[in-house]
Image (cartoon, helix red, strand yellow):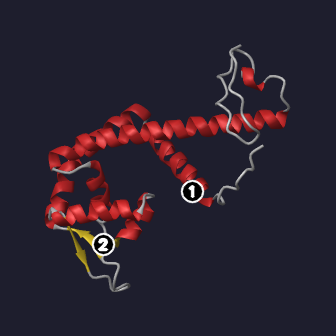
Amino acid sequence: MPDRPQTRRGDAEPAAEPPEAGGAAPAARGRGPRENSRRTSQDLLSRTALGVFRLNGQFLSVSEELARPAGLTAAWWQVLGAVLREPLPVAGIARAMGITRQSVQRIADLLAAKGLAEYVPNPAHRRAKLLRPTDAGRAAVARIGPGHAALATRLAEALGEDGFAETVRVLERLSAALDALPAPVDVPAG
């Protein structure tokens, strides 16, 4: 068996090796049930995170392809999409998207400079203006519609309607669970 790097107590261990046919994962042998459960949870978290990172890359790639003919980037499309139903302040867009306010501000300013969005007064807050799409911004997003619909159809065929709906439910549950977690507690080294 190859040597494993030494880790201090509290350091993350490498993800567990996949289970062998008919048995527990090699890393799980000789450990108690609680330790095995912790290792399994860590492995599941690692696999989930890597899967989500990969999905993020895949979605960004396909979104860039869909947005390009409309003269948009994936990020521009994402921000415009957030304000199609109603104007929102930059901070509200950032919260909904789970990214920094500064990132949204930069994109919102670019969209306004390109004539795809505009800032309007916010009756609830004098300084935090609302962002809303212009007619040109709405038209750009509308040009993405057919490609978006085609991709949705292809994914529904690949996953099945029920499987596609279950995928959405699982991702929403995961996001809600992460939102509900308390802030991480620092684990002392050594």
Q: Residues within 10 Å of mark 2 (few under 14, many from 20)?
A: many
**Kind of residue at badge 2:** Pro
The x, y position of residue 81, in whole percent, is 30, 59
Q: Which mark is residue 34?
A: none
Image-quadrant location for residue 95: bottom left
Q: Residue furthest front?
A: 190
Contact (CB < 8 A) between labels 1 and 2?
A: no
The x, y position of residue 134, in whole percent, is 17, 67
Tell me: residue 130, above or below residue 42.
below
Tell me: residue 45, above or below residue 16.
below
Q: Which residue is mark 2?
A: 87
> How far apart are the alpha carbons under marks 1 and 2?
25 Å
- Which quarter of the rendered picture does the N terminus lie within? top right
Is 66 left, or right, of 69 in this rendering? right
The x, y position of residue 103, in whole percent, is 36, 59
Residue in view at x 31 percent, y 55 percent:
78
Q: Which residue is mark 1?
A: 176
- Which quarter of the rendered picture does the C terminus lie within? top right
Residue in view at x 73 percent, y 16 percent:
22
> Which is more toward the observer, 190 or 173?
190
**Kind of residue at badge 1:** Ala
The x, y position of residue 9, in whole percent, is 77, 39
> Which is more toward the observer, 39 or 84?
39
